[in-house]
Amino acid sequence: MTNIKLKITVIGFLFLFLNVFGQKTELGYKTENHKVYSEDKDEYILKITFPRNYSSDKEYKTLYYLDAYWLTEITLGSFTILDLCNYVEDVVFVGISLNGSEKDWHKQRDMDFTPSQFKNLGLLEGLKNSNPDNNIKITVNTGGGNQLNKESTGGANLFLDFLENEVIQFVEEEYPNLNKQRGLLGHSFGGLFGFYTLQNRPELFQDLLLISASLSWNSSELVDKENFFKLKDSNSEIKLYHSYGGEEIKGIRASNNDISKIITELELKNLKYKFDPVKNTNHHSVLSRAIYDGLLYLYKK
């Protein structure tokens, strides 16, 4: 009898959430959109979402999330459930994405999130090496029909400059109370960019949520112990939640496992690290679970 009552209570609780979201009821969250421009005059949209009972007199942690073009709903939805359950502290979310079409967005992320000009994804090296003449030509297209090549990739350093000197500077000048502590959320190429940022400017973000990072990029060039020397010497206290889907392609699984092994072996005193692959999920279905669990890990009360 107790089990039956418990099931009814849980179902009723879930129905309440579905009903609230289905009616698009205002729950007290507010989002403001702003435009910022890169040196190349590309226009980016910042979606800044404030917690319930937000006050300009109070300092807040801030989470910058990449790919706001399509990750806004799942990111804010996951946080809303955690927040309404009183599991997490108040956080301000800043979504970042190019202002344009889906094709434009894919083109932007191919350039902005990749740390070097495209050579390979590290996924077909065995096939190429087995060919004695090495004459296999591999063409890789991303969403919207964009092709990965030297001209369309390798802009991570410039985007990191833009993120630090334009985006973050704009947010913290416009809202001086949002400089308490910064976080970064990235998926796929965004996760690759997140590790690049952690290795090269560890002082910029203190909370990282990196999912299904494309670490096989250019023969897994970021998966090297030497790339973590700046982090090792940094005074920043950092938390990192790291995940991928258990059913992803081998290149994703292997490269993420390898970098996790490096991080664990380094025993960095300034890094709190949780590696949490999700079984029975792929490159996209992992998002709901990983974002929810990652937010809880980073911001649990």
Image: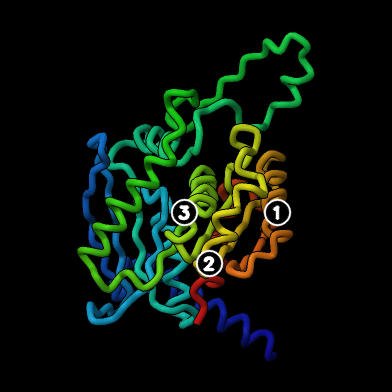
Specify the farthest residue to the front.
233
In what quadrant of the picture does the N terminus appear? Answer: bottom right
Asked whether residue 187 appears in the rendered view, the answer is: no
Residue position marked by numbered label 1 in the rendering: 262
The image shows residue 217 at horizontal and vertical percentages of 59, 36
- Which one is closest to the eye, mark 2 or mark 3? 3
Specify the farthest residue to the bottom.
2
Q: CA distance from mark 2 to mark 1?
A: 16 Å
Asked whether residue 259 appears in the rendered view, the answer is: yes
In the image shown, does 139 or 80 lie closer to the viewer? Answer: 139
Residue at position x 30%, y 51% from top?
165
Residue at position x 32%, y 46% from top?
162
Residue position marked by numbered label 2 in the rendering: 238
Is 55 positioned to the left or the right of 264 in the image? left
Residue type beneath disc 2: Ile
The total of numbered circles placed on residues is 3
The image shows residue 287 at horizontal and vertical percentages of 54, 55
Residue at position x 50%, y 74% from top?
14
Q: CA distance from mark 3 to mark 1?
A: 18 Å
* Crowding at mark 1 (Cα within 10 Å: few <14, some 14-19, many 20+): some
* Crowding at mark 2 (Cα within 10 Å: few <14, some 14-19, many 20+): many
Q: Secondary structure beneath disc 3?
A: loop
Q: Earlier in the sequence, mark 2 or mark 3?
A: 3
Residue type beneath disc 3: Arg
Residue type beneath disc 1: Ile
Q: Secondary structure beneath disc 1?
A: helix
Residue position marked by numbered label 3 in the rendering: 201
Q: For residue 146, which quarter of the picture?
A: top left
Is 261 positioned to the left or the right of 241 in the image? right
